[in-house]
Amino acid sequence: MPDDRNAQSQPDEFYVGYLSMPEGHRKFVSEIVLTLFFVILGLSSLIVISMRDPGEATWDTQSPKSWTGTLIEKPYPMLLPDDQDQHSSLFVVSMGKGGAHDRLGPYFGHHVKLTGYELNRDSRHLIELLAEPDAIEDDPSVQPSSAPVIEPLEHIALTGEIVDGKCYLGAMKPGDGMGHRACAILCISGGIPPMFVAHSPDGDPIYYLLEVDGSTQIAEQILEKVGQPVSVEGGIATMGDIKILRANASDIALVD
């Protein structure tokens, strides 16, 4: 027969909050904590490894800069700088998640001086205007330059991603992908330039200003596709150093 006296001499472990934790409980909790530590460490490593490379995008908020040139409205508000060797055409936006269309309205076609912060990625530049009224100065003493002629090139089919131009060019890192999707939708809805990012056969990024149904103001049905892989069929055009992808809403589809 089993020795009942031995069983009775080993009382059940029972945890009481104000007493020391029983040895069996202590061992169980230690094993759980150690297991969770390694699980969290592994998941964190996977997240870091799977994150996209944010690239060399920069956002210089330390010191405002000034640019002079001609301000144009179409296809998106841009400054054509006087010093073409120093800068390419620069998109112009407001601070925050909004475009500067209304604020720039009286100055389109004028020679101006703009002051703000510079965002830059792969030689694609953007100006974030300061909020002060003197961030835009009209200069009627200088003859404005003519806007570059838009040259149509070819019909093309591309796969890539719709991003907002401000965050992608440096305001956020990374400024693309599902993790940034909600922010990108808010920015594009607010008038930030919509861009389409594709890649060459060599893997180099190619940036396009996106026009859908003839406008850079993107409709709700296209906003739903922002931040996800999409296929686009449309026409490519160039305006100076700006590549423009022109498509109909019906020709933009999610990629499975």
Image (tube, rainbow, N blue to C red):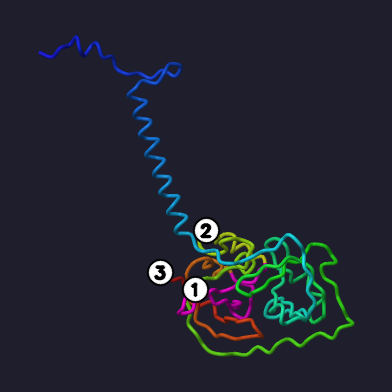
Q: Residue furthest front?
A: 85
Q: Which residues are magenta?
A: 191-219
Q: Position of residue 82 (x, y in %)?
A: 77, 81
Q: Residue at x 37, y 35 (%)?
A: 32
- Identify residue type, mark 1: Gly
The residue to which callout 2 is attached is 179
**Marks 3/2: CA–CA distance:** 18 Å
| Left or right of residue 180, residue 18 in this image | left
User: Of label 1 and label 3, which has the lower sequence position?
Assistant: 1
The residue to which callout 3 is attached is 256
**In front: label 3 or label 2:** 2
For numbered disc 3, what is the local secondary structure? loop
Q: Position of residue 184 (x, y in %)?
A: 59, 63
The local crowd at label 1, few if under 14, some if 14 to 19, many if 20 or more residues have their Cα within 10 Å, is many
The local crowd at label 2, few if under 14, some if 14 to 19, many if 20 or more residues have their Cα within 10 Å, is few
Q: Are marks 3 and 2 in contact (CB under 8 Å)?
A: no
The residue to which callout 1 is attached is 160
